[in-house]
Image (cartoon, helix red, strand yellow):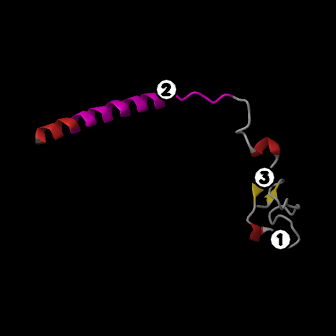
Amino acid sequence: MPWCAHCDEYLAPPRVRADGTCPTCGTTVDPGGARPAAQADVSGSDDPLEALPWHFKLLLGAIAVYLGYRALQGVEWLVGLF
C-alpha cells in the first residue's frame, strides 16, 4: 500500500499518479507502504499495559451479578417445571 510521508497517510493505489507522486502534495510516495518505524508497531514496546478504568471493572462486576441472578432464576424455573 503506497505511503506518503509528507501527508502521513496511506494512499489507495489508484490514487497515486502515474509518475509515483501523491495527488495531494506532489511528493514521491513510498510504493512499499512501509510506515516509519516509530509509528508502525507499538506492540513490541516495553511499556506496561494501562490498567482498566474503575468504571469498567464496576460494569463487569454488575454484569456478572446480573447474569448470576438470571442463571439462578433459570434454574428455579426449570425446577418448577418438574
- Nearer to us: label 2 or label 3: 2
Q: Point out residue 23 in the picture as x, y percentages from the top left corner.
A: 81, 66
Looking at the image, which residue sits at the far front? 82
Quarter holding residue 43:
top right
Q: Give the amino acid type for the residue marked by disc 2 in the picture.
A: Trp
Q: Which residue is mark 1?
A: 17
Q: Point out residue 60 in the picture as x, y percentages from the top left corner.
A: 42, 32
Q: Give me the residue at 22% from left, 39% from top.
A: 74
Task: Give yes or no for residue 49 being in the magenta stretch.
Answer: yes
* Vertical comparison of 36 with 80: above or below: below
Q: How far apart in space, not on screen, are marks 2 and 3 (Cα)?
A: 35 Å
Q: Give the amino acid type for the residue marked by disc 3 in the picture.
A: Asp
Of the numbered discs in the image, which one, if any, rests on residue 54? 2
Looking at the image, which residue sits at the far bottom? 18
Q: Which residue is mark 3?
A: 8
Task: Give yes or no for residue 56 being in the magenta stretch.
Answer: yes
Q: Earlier in the sequence, mark 3 or mark 1?
A: 3
Viewer-closest of 10 and 37: 37
Q: Give me the residue at 83% from left, 71% from top.
A: 17
Q: Residues within 10 Å of mark 1 (few under 14, many from 20)?
A: few
